[in-house]
Image (cartoon, rainbow, N blue to C red):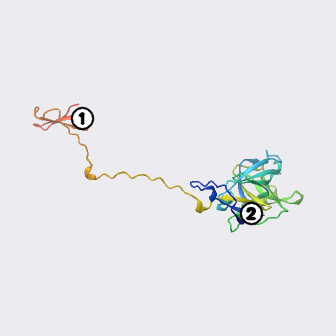
Amino acid sequence: MAFAQDASGNNSVDYPAASAPANNTASDRVVLDPGTVIPVLLDTELSSKTANAGDTFTAKVDTNRSAYNSLLRGAEVEGVVRHVSPQSGSDPGTLDLTFTRLRLLGGESYLIFGTVTSLDSKDLQVKSDGTLQAVKTNKDQSLTYAGIGAGAGALINVLGGGKFRIEDLLLGGGLGYAAGQLLKGTQKVSDVDLKPGTPVGVLLNQRVSYHRTYVPAAALVVPAAPVVPAAPVVPTSSLRVPVRAVRSSRSTADSGRRYYSYLGHPYYLDLKTGKRVRLD
């Protein structure tokens, strides 16, 4: 990926909890070279049982990697179902997808030629800028989803003459077991069913170039935290605890008794005998 500094941008990216004047923005020219892999998450379900050739769909760029959060934050790709066949007998359902457009957060869109690729770490390498690069980019092979095994779909290579071999399982199941059982005719087949949120790798087969407008870190204005006035300090010597005087409604000289209350109940103490009597 290459960058060329360009000061022509005027729009600012909406950074949470920070802002900057429009004249403090900057712009980079971003180039995504052939072989770059863009990780995306499907917005809608795709199934070989219900889809038709020509159906369109969208997928959001997965920005969990910091490189994609910086370069493609809020972007999405548009795709088309190129070929589909439902599961029939011992033949698994297949779903062949292609990607046609990259749409940025600001609404700008660019034509792309993208195909499905594996997101397995063994099939990718991380470039110096943090983006992903496919290890293999053989244009003579087309990767297609097939309903093989326990997962939602297996990613396979479709070769000449209609034959195919298992190249990689994108979701669920084990590669070696699935391949072996498929050749024996005992592997379970089904329709491909890719749920919303399914991760998909988009392999770019042509260069894509666009301008990214952003706010430099030095230009960000972070609002200061509000100042809360401290509570006044009251000297302990000035504190007064009100004490209510409790007086007996009866005289202690009344028949030699002293009246008092205990736990909310009235009592009297006979001063002669020492006997205590509860009055309620």
Q: Is residue 100 visible?
A: yes
Q: Position of residue 72 (x, y in %)?
A: 69, 57
Gap between marks 2 and 1 measured at Cα = 88 Å
Q: Secondary structure at mark 1?
A: strand
Q: Which quadrant holds residue 15?
A: bottom right
The amino acid on which the numbered mark 2 sits, given as a three-letter code, is Val
Residue visible at 67% across and 53% down in the picture: 74
- 254 or 92, which lies in front? 254
Residue denoted by label 2: 31
Q: Which mark is residue 228?
A: none
Q: Is residue 118 in sight in this rendering?
A: no
Residue 231: where, in percent of width, then height?
37, 51
Residue at figure coordinates x 63%, y 55% from the top left: 22
Q: Label 1 is placed on what type of residue?
A: His
Question: Which of label 2 and label 1 is nearer to you?
Answer: 2
**In this rendering, is residue 140 above or below 260?**
below
Q: Indicate the position of residue 218 as horizontal and vertical percent values.
A: 58, 63
Q: Please identify the quarter of the rendering in which residue 32 is found.
A: bottom right
Instruction: Check if mark 2's residue and mark 1's residue have beta carbons within 8 Å.
Output: no
Element on which disc 2 rests: strand
What crowding class fits label 2: few (fewer than 14 Cα within 10 Å), some (14-19), or many (20 or more)?
A: some
Query: Residue sitting at 53 percent across and 55 percent down?
Result: 223
- Which of the two labelled residues, at mark 2 and mark 1, occupies the earlier sequence position? 2
Q: Which residue is mark 1?
A: 265
